[in-house]
Amino acid sequence: MRVRLSLVPRIRRVLVREPIQAVALSVLLAAGVGASVCIAASGPRDHRSLVPRHGFLVGDLSGRLRVLSHGGDTVRRIPGSLGRDGPQGIALAAGRRRAFVSVLRGDRPPHLYRVNLATGEKRRIANGISPALDWRRRRLAYVSVVRSSDMLYKRALIVRNLRTGEKRQIPLGPGIPLGTPPDNIINWSPTGRSIAFYDDAYVRLARLGATKRPISEPVAPRSQQAPVFLDSHTLVVLANCCIGRHQHLVAIDRRTGGSRRFATLGAPPENLARVRRGHLLAVTALGRLTTVSRHHTREIAKGITAAAR
C-alpha cells in the first residue's frame, strides 16, 4: 500500500494500536523517502470476537460447538469434538474468543474445559459441570463433581478469579447426587454477590461475602429448581419439573416472597441463564434453544445441548 506523506500524521494516530507497523513507518520516514512511502505490513491482528454480540455459542448433538446468528443460522463451526453426547454447559469468556465448556462422561466425573474458539484446542481445568461467569466475566463458577461408590456427587461450588487464579470452595453438603439436568443449573446474581443453586431439595444462595455460613436458607418452595435471576430482586425457578406437557417458570419477588407466572416451556430446561434484564436464554430437554421473557418464548434452533450468549 502506498501512502502520501500528507497522510502520515493521520496514519501515525491510527497505527498507535499497531506498534510494529508504526515502527516500520517511522524507519521509512527517517530514511528520507520521497513523495510516498510503503508501509511494511506485519499482517493484521484480528481482535474481533468469534461470537457476534447478539449471536450464540452452542453445543449440538454431534458433540461439536457452533456459532449461531441471532436468527439461529450457523455462521461458524468450531474445530474439534467434545464428545458424542454434546456439552452440558457453556460459559462465554470475555472477548468472546474462548469458552468454558463442561462435558458429561457417563458414570465418570464430567470434565470442564477451557476451549480456544479459533483453533478448537481444549484444556481440562477441573472435574465439574455448569460453568457460569459473573456479569464482568472475571469470575468463573462451577460445581465440582466426584465419584464415590459408583455414584457421582456434587461436592462444592467453586469460584475462580480468572485474573489472579485465586479459587474459593464452598461445600454443598454430603451426599448430593449429580441428579437430572434442572437440578444442576447455577446462576450469578446481577450484583455478583451471590450464586443461586439447587441442593437436591431447595434453591439456596451461596453468599460470596460471607465467611461463616455462606449457604443461605431456602429461597424458594421445596423441589422448585433451575434458579436464575431475572433482576436483583427477582428469582425465576422451575415450578413443576418434570410433570405434564408444560413446564412452568415462576418469578419470586425476594423482598415480599410473592410469586407470579413468568413463562411456559415445552420441556424442562437443561440450561437457563439471564442475558439481560427481564430476558432469559434456555435450552430444553428436547434440544430447543429458546429465548424467554414474561409470557413469551421464541424458539431459535433445534438439536442443541447447551448454549451461551
Image (cartoon, rainbow, N blue to C red):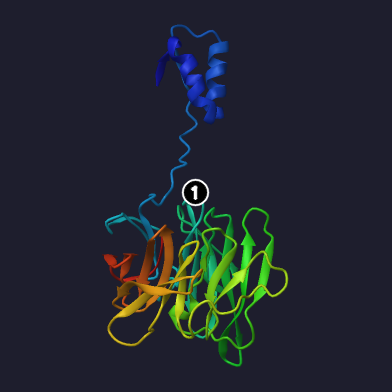
What is the total number of numbered labels drawn onto the structure image? 1
Q: Is residue 172 visible?
A: yes
Residue situated in front as seen by the camera: 71 or 42: 71
Residue situated in front as seen by the camera: 252 or 193: 252
**Residue pictured at 58% horizontal, 11% vertical:** 30
* Image coordinates for residue 82, horizontal then vertical, percent: 45, 69
Residue density around tag 1, few if under 14, some if 14–19, many if 20 or more, within 10 Å: some
> At label 1, which amino acid type do we have?
Gly
Q: Is residue 170 above or below residue 177?
A: above
Q: Is residue 14 above or below residue 95?
A: above
**In the visual, does 183 lie left or right of 291?**
right
The residue that disc 1 covers is 95
* Image coordinates for residue 285, horizontal then vertical, percent: 35, 78
Residue extending furthest toward the right = 212
**Residue pictured at 27% horizontal, 84% vertical:** 245
Q: Is residue 285 visible?
A: no
* Image coordinates for residue 284, horizontal then vertical, percent: 35, 74
**In the visual, does 93 lie left or right of 241?**
right
**In the visual, does 33 lie left or right of 168?**
left
* Image coordinates for residue 123, horizontal then vertical, percent: 56, 63
* Occupied quadrant, residue 215: bottom right
Q: Secondary structure at mark 1?
A: loop
